[in-house]
Amino acid sequence: MKITNYISVILCSIALYSCSDAAKTIGFGTDSDAIEAPATGGTHTVKVSAQKEWIATTDEPWITISPANGRGTTECRVLIDSALTDQPRRGVIRIQEQNTWVKKEIAVSQKGFDYLISIDDKEVTVANYAAYGTRHFDVKIKTNVDFNVKVSESAESWLKFEKPAVEFDRGIRPREVTVRFNWNINSQPNPRIAEVAFNPKTEVELAQHDNLVVTQQAAEAIEENTRGGDSIALLAIARTLECNNTSWENGERMDNWDNVILWEEGMESYTPEKKGRVKYARFYIFNTKEELPFEVQYLTAADELNFYSNVNSYLKDLTTGEYITKLTQLRRLTIAAYGLVSLDKNFTALKNLEFLDLSSNNFQKIPEEINPTNFPKLRTLNMGANTRKNIYDLSNTVETNYGGLVEEQGFPRRLIEWDLDTVVLSVNYLQGPLPKMDDWEKYTEQDIIDADTLPRALIGTPKVMPHTKWFAINLNRLTGELPDWLLYHPALDWWGPSVLVFSQEGKDASGTLAGFTNEPANMNYYYEFYEGYKKDPDTEEEEETTK
């Protein structure tokens, strides 16, 4: 009985030992024999089961396993790079026990990229107006194919784009491309829509193909030919120009706005339909890099408009724009220190202008549009100080585009022939002599009889600008002799000649010192010429002192 029990205990012990040893034996292998990766790549986990040391290898550089060797059971990370093409690719990971032929293989497959042009925000809305330099938006496009941008034909005039080059240094992996769109002001009381297509340059099948729709809000409605429309237009112009000198936003009635005059009964050219509307408006000290705002066209009752002092105007190259040309009723217009270098092609529509001030701009020459045919009623022209900078010696400079009417070939005779009441050409770079005008009409005996204020000595002198009350040509680069028509002009003493006519400065393009060779020391010669018709102001002062 005792022997039997002893044998049983031994057999049980053997059995228990065998079970324990079997539990410790681990088969070599992995928890996966295949990995399917997307085109973007990524990280996957593989568990290696083993008792002995092992090593992992792969046949493709786009597959990385870490750790690549170990002992016993280990969890490994498999890193798969992003694909480079649209084609699928395959690779193998081999895990082998060291010092044995036992190994496991894991098949790795990766999809290629689909071609796409993808946009997150497919609809964009922009305002009808924003400050200059802020009228743009960016569209971020995810793509792996080069593309063209096409704006619908109806929107090409107001929506432009700046498309960067698409770089494919990383194969056809999608990358983010930014396209900037610039939009113009909407002057109409209706919204407008642009459809923008992004079309691949080559024929490929796109898995995703997004396009863009841009909606621009309508402009605030301006009721034309009304007092209310005038007030909205004034506010809009001031905002667009970024004027900082108006009190128009304070809620006051337009009657109390500074720099604004409204039509009232009794004013010259008043008509009942003008009552309460804008007759005159002045905009000054502003900052714009654009032509005159579109709202200008709504000031259809205005008799005079004044735009003066644009910030850093000497750095700008602007034109008037088309909207001012619609105000054909204007009689007086000032666009000074604005940065103008040209006039709109329709500027000649302003045929009722009597006064035009284009001073302190950047004109290289007097615009061809300015002539008596286009402006038959014009009496005053001011084109003084069109210099961007002061250049003393024009023969010793490398500067270009410095304004000052420098492109005029000599003195602009056409302005002398025009016979305006006022001509101001001061502080420019006009060069050469004044025209003698010997071929021009001369004073006759009948002129002397009709005027009854002119000496007979004037007969035979060119009858130049007989109605001009103000003529200023000082601080140019004029040279040569003063012609008789100017030295003995009936209005010369009114012109302040010692300051506003005779005085020149600097050197011209040939290096000649500016100034007239026969500039008179005083006006004695003039009053001797007009003896009995004019009195020397100095003589009048002496007579007053004697009394």
Image (spheres, helix red, strand yellow):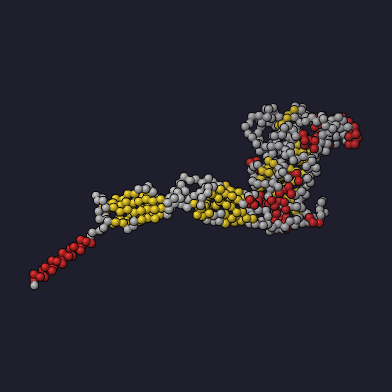
- Asked whether residue 40 appears in the rendered view, the answer is no
Would you say 396 lies left or right of 119 here? Answer: right
- What residue is at 85 percent from the left and 36 percent from the top? 547
Task: Give how far across and how far down residue 255 sits, in percent.
Answer: 74, 56
Quadrant occupied by the N terminus: bottom left
Would you say 4 lies left or right of 312 here? Answer: left
* Residue closest to the eye, 531 or 181: 181
Task: Please count the marks in the image.
Answer: 0
Q: In this view, does 413 lie above or below 101?
A: above
- What residue is at 89 percent from the left and 34 percent from the top? 447
- What residue is at 68 percent from the left and 29 percent from the top? 509
Task: Give how far across and how far down residue 305 sits, in percent.
Answer: 73, 48
Would you say 53 lies left or right of 113 here? Answer: left
Q: Is residue 336 above or below residue 123?
A: above
Task: Give how far across and how far down residue 454 sits, in percent.
Answer: 87, 34
Task: Give how far across and how far down residue 319 sits, in percent.
Answer: 68, 44
Q: Is residue 390 above or below residue 215?
A: above
